[in-house]
Amino acid sequence: MKNVIDILEDLIALPSVNPMGGSDSAPDLCGEAKVNDYMSDFIGKIGLKPFVQETALPGRDNVGAVLYKGADYKTVILQCHTDTVGIGDNRQLLRPIRKNSRIYGRGACDCKGGLAAMLAALAQAAENPDKVKNNVIVMGVSDEEYSFKGSLALCEQEPSKNAAFGIIGEPTGCRVVNGFKGVARWNASVTGKAFHSSEPEKGVNAIYRMAKLISLIEKYQSELENGETISVGTVKGGSAVNIVPDACTIEIDRRLTKNTSPEKAFKDLEKYLSRSLDFNFSFSDLKDAQNAILIEPDHPGVRILSEICKDMDIDGAPQQVAFGSDAYRMNAAGIPTVLWGPGSIAVAHTNDEYVSMDDLIKAEEFYFRAMNHTLK
């Protein structure tokens, strides 16, 4: 059986770009099917039976395996998403590189490194089932980078929907993450009046209007407190260089503490902008709305993972992060879920994405130990 480093290199070489609702990426790069096929083959080779959960996205399923101990045991899910962000025209990112005790490539830390370690740990568990102290599900979950259809299916379907605890292999630097900022996302739009660019004064430039609105959002960010943030992620406007644009839309990303709900964040910004702008704007409905979450440090699952860290000479103190993950959906569905994974979020989605080999080896051991501790 391949080791964890070999497994990761295999996974990096299998493109699984999330098309994000209409990507410019080449069709042969998009979707999770190649990774799903690899997982199914791997699971079969270690003597387990793969299962599939269909999602709302045709051909983009979840794939996993169950190591079942019995009805008297609690079920723990270990999952990683199988999709990645795009690679542009840089297909070199699909060629894993070993350098300075690191593995470079798209998905190396987000989240194929965690997935490789979970598969390697599952192989150990399949060889040593007597050591496993819970019903264990290891899942590859689709569509985490965009519309979360994979995690929604996981929370609604057997055998995962009634799990007692979840671990997601997002890159946390091999630290237990038990707290997540909330998130709210929506669009803001403004309109203008189209006219030929040779006489721009006869039109109303929607992009200029939007520039004023964005400037106010930047000012609003400077006034937020307690670690809350707001960011404009995309700007779309105009149809041609010689036409005064009559519409412009931005996407807003708001990160929240437990002091602010997504609905409050939405309304507060609407009021703030209305006080300063002399033109109309409109907001879409909330496209994503998740409250901040904290799994208490004394939760049995968190305690187990912290103890495993300490036994492995890793800092076991739970921490909180700002980035989002499938943990939102799982916690909302009643499955207490934390993050623990190899690599750093700081290099995720970059052209220099990597994970250290040392982290990968630690992760395999950590996940296997998590399977071997009884969840009470």
Image: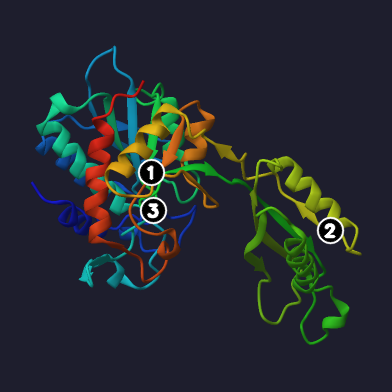
For the residue pair 298 and 71, the one nearer the viewer reads as 298
The CA distance from mark 3 to mark 2 is 36 Å
Measured in 3D between alpha carbons, the distance from the residue under mark 1 to the one under mark 2, in whole angstroms, is: 37 Å
Name the side, left or right, on which 63 lies relative to 223.
left
Residues marked 1 and 2 touching at CB (< 8 Å): no
Q: Position of residue 161 (x, y in %)?
A: 41, 24
Residue sitting at 47 percent across and 39 percent down?
A: 327
Q: Which mark is residue 142?
A: 1
Where is residue 140? Give x, y as percent: 31, 41
Q: In the rendered view, would you say 83 is above or below 152?
A: below
Q: Earlier in the sequence, mark 1 or mark 3?
A: 1
Q: Quadrant of residue 39?
A: top left
Q: Nearer the viewer, mark 3 or mark 2?
A: 3
Residue at 34%, 39% (x, y): give it. 79
The dot on residue 171 is 3
In the picture, measured across the screen, residue 174 lies left or right of residue 266, that is left
Q: Point out residue 42 in the picture as x, y percentages from the top left corner.
A: 15, 42
Q: Position of residue 201 (x, y in %)?
A: 87, 82
Residue at 67 percent across and 58 percent down: it is: 230
Amino acid at pointer 3: Pro
Who's the residue at 23% across and 60% down the image? 357
> What is the quadrant of residue 216 in the picture?
bottom right
Characterize the local packing of mark 1: few (<14), some (14-19) or many (20 or more) Cα atoms within 10 angstroms.
many
Amino acid found under the numbered disc labelled 1: Ser
Seen from the viewer's position, the closer of residues 304 and 281 is: 304
| CB atoms of marks 1 and 3 within 8 Å | no
Dot 2 lies on which element? helix
- Would residue 182 be seen by someone viewing this image from the given angle? yes
User: Outermost residue toward the top?
Assistant: 72
Secondary structure state at the residue bearing disc 1: loop
Q: Splitting the image into 4 quarters, where does residue 337 fall?
A: top left
Residue, disc 2: 273
